[in-house]
Image (spheres, grey):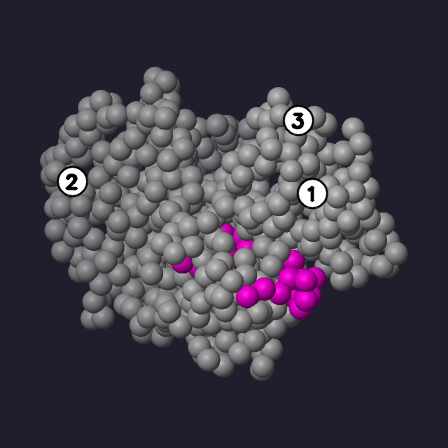
Amino acid sequence: MTTNSKYRQLAIRKEDKEFTIKNTDNDTLRKWFYLLTLGRKLDEKAPNYLKQALGWSYHAPYAGHDGIQLAIGQIFDRNTDHLFPYYRDMLTVISAGLTAEEIILNGLSKATDIASGGRHMSNHFAKPEWNIHNVSSSTGNHTLHAVGVARAIKYYGAKGVAISSQGESSASEGYVYEAINGASREELPVIFVFQDNGYGISVPKSGQTANPRVSDNFLAFKNLSIIYCNGKDMFNSMNAMLKAKHTVLEKGKPVIVHANCIRIGSHSNSDRQELYRSPEELQEARLMDPLAKFRKILLYSEKFTEEELVAIEQEAAQVISAAHKKALTAQDPDPASIFNFVTAEPYKSETYLDGIPDGSGPKRKFIEALNETLKAEFRLNSDTFMWGQDMASGTKGGIFNVSKGMQQEFGLKRVFNAPIAEDFIVGTANGMSRFNEKIRIVIEGAEFADYFWPAMEQLVEMSHDYWRSNGQFTANVTIRLACGGYIGGGLYHSQTIESALSTLPGLRIVYPSFADDAAGLLRTCIRSKGPTVFLEPKALYNDPVATAPVPDDFVVPFGKARIRRKGDRLTIVTYGNTTHMCLQAAEKVANEKKIQVEVIDIRSIVPLDSETILRSVEKTNRALVVHEDKQFSGFGAEIAAMIQEKAFRSLDAPVKRVGGTYTPIGFNRILEKAILPDEDKIHKAINEILAF
């Protein structure tokens, strides 16, 4: 007996009447009682695995949420809907069709766990092939993903809804507000379920919001309906979820379902609720047990006899026993598999294997190369989208006009504005890309890279989606960020952030210096699977030094550096704005001393072409690393360490670095010049290394 064969979800029909004990047929009631019993027995069994040192080291019991979780799973249609459960949603996914064996495999973190193969925390349930999405431990952040996939449902005219489930305390998170605000503004088919048990771990609701019902914080939102229900009652919860789904399907507008629940157990197996809840409160919670109440209703209504209910309970126990035996013998994850699914498969060109152009094509400015490449890729793939701030306002195309003309050519449904909410921009990109593997998304993550920090939580999420889901999902998103100084921008307008981003496994990071590489790398980013951060040195947008011929359909592969100047006495490793300064300093040294300095433009920060760097250093025996970011903890430290470790025997001098000072970047041009690298500082460093 499996929960996804005999006990299937409820078929949703427009003519469905409200459920009551009187008008609900016995087959449906039997199904519900079986699912409720199966879930509760698993919920109570989970802590025993930890006590026996078998696993399930994180378990958040759902007892007290029985009604709403049963209802969510019953109205979910795996063929059309998308479900984003949270860590307490064990019964939700059982009601949606997951088997007892699949639940236990997740709890024991086995290799055959369908959610993540043991890579993610236990009690984080998913089945991507059914559109039950892998959700992280960051509470409530999946609301943005639900909004993103709902945007795709609406755009493609698909049937179905997105369902986001969470505790009421996670609604205190800023990105939950951003998600509901965005769904309301765009009129998207999404249901937000708040399972309100009164506590955020040990913090009561009064410590979260002034409103006793957190959903009341959203009463003023246009295009948003709010439905309140008793999440402990099966019939009331089922009717509320049915009404919510009918409302979303008929009106195409979002709904919040606020379910009043009770938390019978502690927050999790690492929590001791007796430290903050009185004995009287705990006793009251136990007396409100939804399953015990439902069992009594079935008996008092004479729908079932005691013997029939006991038989169903025994059936559930037998299913769990068989699942337990199978799960215990399941394969554990292989330690060697940790490097699988870190980064998704990049696009590979059969023409430009090393990303070296053939010199053909008209000469283009950096900004022209970006604009023309974006348009070409949007014409090539009609499932390509772009949004950000100031993206579609009249003839303006982003704050720097990189995307100028795109909204006019491709329409406001493919190129559109986003609120000033960086989390929303990135999170909904993650969500929308879940709808269809053909979808490619380009976003301006922020108007300046300096403003990207609010989106870092969503970027972290995106970076490990592929690994966490065991290769079942990756967000096909290119995040464009205008970065760097030399424009007199000062704080929040002159920063470059690659060193911080490079600490996140799963992200690709590219940083072109010339128009041809800008076009080639952008094309590769868009065509590749997985997330890539595309850093654009804005000082080069219209600078003549960055112009270059750009061949048609030019592609630059990730992880391939480009030798911009050949030499034999010193290797300079650089990227971005400082590439041009390094070339000028190298030319100056050649004129002064007849010494040839090799300049390597790495182009791709992650992955890094260490082979080209090391081969050059082994030839020249000296190395200088230059970038405009702060020298202290800048990405150049990683390059220098790599050279020191792998080419030490070839070095005739210490590896030297030139970078920005360990200070904020000043607005006054005099201060900016003192802080950032320039040709003179690089020239001085070259001479110091050569003189060693």
Q: Which quarter of the picture shows residue 252?
A: bottom left
Left or right of 383? Residue 412 is right
Q: Which mark is residue 596?
A: 1
Q: Earlier in the sequence, mark 3 or mark 1?
A: 1
Mark 2 sits on what residue? 2
Residue 262: horizontal and vertical position, in percent? 42, 43
Mark 3 sits on what residue? 651
Q: Is residue 501 magenta?
A: no
Q: Element type at marker 2?
A: loop
Q: Element type at marker 3?
A: loop
Q: Nearer the viewer, mark 1 or mark 2?
A: 1
Q: Earlier in the sequence, mark 1 or mark 2?
A: 2
Q: Are marks 1 and 2 in contact (CB under 8 Å)?
A: no
Is 506 or 168 nearer to us in this picture? Answer: 506
Q: Which residue occupies 30% across, 25% down?
A: 332
Is 476 or 518 nearer to us in this picture? Answer: 518
Q: Amino acid at mark 1?
A: Gln
Kindly tell me whether residue 427 is visible in this rendering: no
Q: Amino acid at mark 2?
A: Thr
Quadrant the C terminus occupies = top right
Q: Which quarter of the picture shows residue 12?
A: bottom left
Packing grade of label 2 (10 A; few <14, some 14-19, many >=20) is some
Q: Which residue occupies 24% across, 26% down?
A: 330
